[in-house]
Amino acid sequence: MMEKMERKKTVLLSLIADWEKLCKKFLSKQIRNEKVYKVKKNPYSFGYISGELKAIEIMKQLIEEAWRR
């Protein structure tokens, strides 16, 4: 039972890590495009991804708290 829960936690954290990596990659691409190509950044997508990163941090904290219980 404990091994199954550990596996679920590992899978969940790896999915969250992948999503975080994609969000950070998108933000760095947005910033690079703005600097190199002088493309104006889209404030909606920039704000949305920033919000996603905040949500990811909250999810990580909740998972760790739930795991400790």
Image (tube, rainbow, N blue to C red):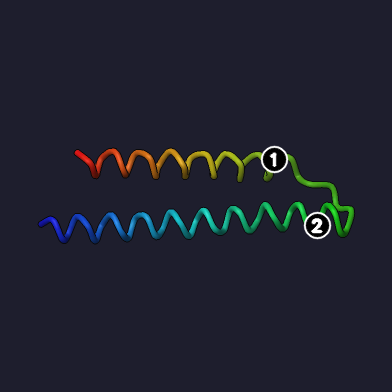
**Does residue 59 appear left or right of residue 22 in this picture?**
left
Residue 18: image tag: none
**Does residue 30 appear left or right of residue 60 in this picture?**
right
Say above or below: 19 vs 46: below
Residue at the left extreme of this rendering: 1
Residue 33: image tag: 2
- Quadrant assignment, res 12: bottom left
Residue at the spot of label 1? 44
Residue at (46, 42) in percent of width and height: 57
> Dot 1: few (<14), some (14–19), or many (≥20) neighbours within 10 Å?
few
- Which mark sits nearer the N-terminus, 2 or 1? 2
Residue at (40, 42) in percent of width and height: 59
Mark 1: secondary structure:
helix
Q: Amino acid at mark 1?
A: Tyr
**Does residue 32 appear left or right of residue 27 in this picture?**
right
Mark 2: secondary structure:
helix
- x then y, percent, for residue 19: 50, 56
- x then y, percent, for residue 4: 17, 60
Residue at (48, 40) in percent of width and height: 55
- Quadrant assignment, res 1: bottom left
